[in-house]
Amino acid sequence: MRFQWRGGAAAMSLSTMVATSSAAPASGKPPAILLLRPVDPPFAVALRERFRVLDFLSSGEPLPAFLAAAAAVPDPPRAAVVMGGGAVRVDGVLFDAVPSLRCVVSTAAGIDHIDLPECARRGVVVANSGKVYSADVADHAVGMLIDVMRRVSAADRYVRRGLWPLQGDYPLGSKLSGKRVGIIGLGNIGSLIAKRLEAFGCVISYNSRKPKDSVPYSYFADVRALAADSDVLVVSCALNKETRRIVDGEVLDALGPGGVLINIGRGANVDEAELVRALREGRIAGAGLDVFDGEPKKPAALVAMDDKVVMTPHVAVWTTESRSDLRDHTVANLEAFFSGEPLLTPVTMLP
Amino acid sequence: MDSLGVLLVAPMNAYLEQELDRRCRLFRLWEAPPEPDRRAEFLRANASSIRAVVPYAAHGVDAAMLDALPRLEIVASYSVGIDRVDLAACRARGVRVTNTPDVLTDDVADLAVGLAIAVLRKIPQADRYVRAGLWKSKGDFTLTTRFSGKRVGIIGLGRIGLAVAKRVEAFDCPINYYQRTKQEYPNYTYYPSVIELATNSDVLVVACPLNEHTRHIVNREVMEALGPKGALINIGRGPHVDEAEIVAALVDGRLGGAGLDVFEDEPNVPEALLSLDNVVLVPHVGSGTHETRKAMADLVLGNLEAHVSGKPLLTQVV
């Protein structure tokens, strides 16, 4: 019986996989991969052109059944493509179900959905999205910051409502150039934000787990101290135990009445209820937020702040270029793995 | 300078008005009713006292006003653009003119970059999406276009144009420019015409002064050269751009998008623009920060002080 692999709308059936498990030889066929996340058509095509794609979402099966069937095919999958956000956890359960897996390629930058120690124990190599998203996220952070300081979105609403001829000039904003910017998390994204804002004459400081060598910015071990010394605070760190609610009421108070917060990390990095209170009471001046608690949502309390807040629906990575870069990057990591080369963007455990 | 009679054309800045009132003899043009004959009467009544005028972007000094103020010695504009001051007429009458360069360069450049990112990444539109509850009801927002690495074309590499270039370099944007005289910049590519500049750019920024050579410098051809994926950013003057043409081009999609801070007939903005999703519209806020407007006011006051005390003017144009 001919092995039936993923193509067009055809799903892989359990019986087909079991029936052919001892059939055709493994050599000469494209390697099998597990696809554990949704992909757009160009991405699906790019994968199918190169690999035998075992597609979880199209299978219609519950995950354990799908994994068992995948593990039983001839030349079972040695690599898996996963997404961030914890939809499918990469952990011992997955590896027990599909022992052939030797490589995981995540399409996210963050790796909180991946049990790295377990991967290391089993010799499974892990790749993430590397710097694919970094420029777009940094650009979005800068765009949001200019918007909040200069009230671009609010002024645009004012014009569209026909208020300029009726109410006259729009209230003044705040100068960005030369302001002190504190960045929480100086990784790929944080570094690009710093580089961009330096060109605006901003003075950059940062907080991260440890100071970074050969970085020309002032380091603050304590986020409150960073906030106290900053006019703008940018959250661009990963979400983990240490960074949950890293921006709390005390940090906001330290940022102060003229201060602006920009969050392009995760909603949970900021105490959102405290942020609402701080804005309402004028304890900080404004905020630009791409991420929230409980997405997707209409954050009513923040919407009511009108021109103090700029909000976008988690779109910092959402460009056509990022999508095609991510596709190329994921394919490149998979091809590197299957040809025995090192991964382009391996994730190693931090000491 | 408490004997200096100063005519302020509009209540453009409370601090400026307060200082002029405190330090000079202030005449407020808007206290006269707006009809031309009432204005003329006001000027006549105070002509013997008025030796200085402070205009701004929205209201200049023309030959008629100069004729009405025979004792006028200096025009100290609260703006860097002085397209609405009749410089030839001032020169002819020996009236000195100053403006407010440099102090607003950063703000205008910041806004230009902010508008470019806002247009390409659809930030105001995304903000509207969240505010309207559409994220919850309709799901994901549309994909947008990356800003980093896009080719930025700048019309006029003066103070503001260079400040824009410096900023977008940090986004790895290749920089092209056009101006009447080519200068050598190692990292910037010169194009000998605006059409060629537009053809080779993804984002086109208007940063030149408005004069007889630059009116409608962005015309239909330039917009079409910039194209369906291009974005125009105007932080110059409304008349730099053929406004009727840009409305049509944006509606048709012959021009991809625009970020506009200035318009031909401020505060009026063409109705057709108000409902477009591919534009960002702001009400002439290029220098609109507390810090900069105070610095501009101080420069106006400084120029008036220098004039009165016989010292060199700080930022003389004529």
Image: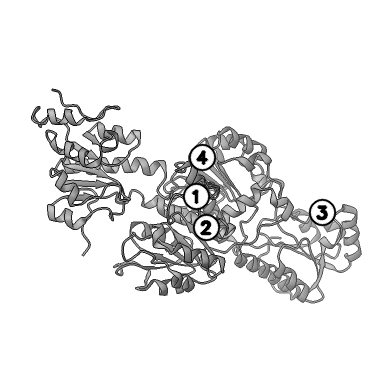
User: Which labelled disc corresponds to residue A146?
Assistant: 2
Q: Position of residue A68 (x, y in %)?
A: 17, 39
Give the alpha-carbon distance from disc 4 to disc 1, as whole Å.
13 Å
Instruction: Give the amino acid type for the residue marked by disc 1 in the picture.
Output: Ile
Front one among B294 and A275 = A275
Q: Are marks 1 and 2 in contact (CB under 8 Å)?
A: yes
* Residue B84 coordinates in the image, percent (x, y): 73, 53
Q: Amino acid at mark 3?
A: Ala
Residue denoted by label 1: B117
The residue lying furthest to the top in this view is A1
The tag earlier along the polypeptide, 3 or 4, is 3
Establish whether labels 3 and 2 are both on one chain: no
- What number is the disc on residue B63? 3
Camera-side mark, 4 or 2: 2
Foreground tag (3 vs 2): 2
Q: How many marks?
A: 4
How busy is the neighbourhood of tag 4: few (under 14 within 10 Å), some, or many (20 plus)?
many
Instruction: Tell me the SS state at disc 4.
Output: loop
Circle 3 chain: B
Disc 4/disc 2 C-alpha distance (Å): 21 Å
Residue at (88, 64) in percent of width and height: B47
Note whether A72 is above or below B214 in the view shown.
above
Whole-angstrom CA distance, mark 1 to mark 3, is 41 Å
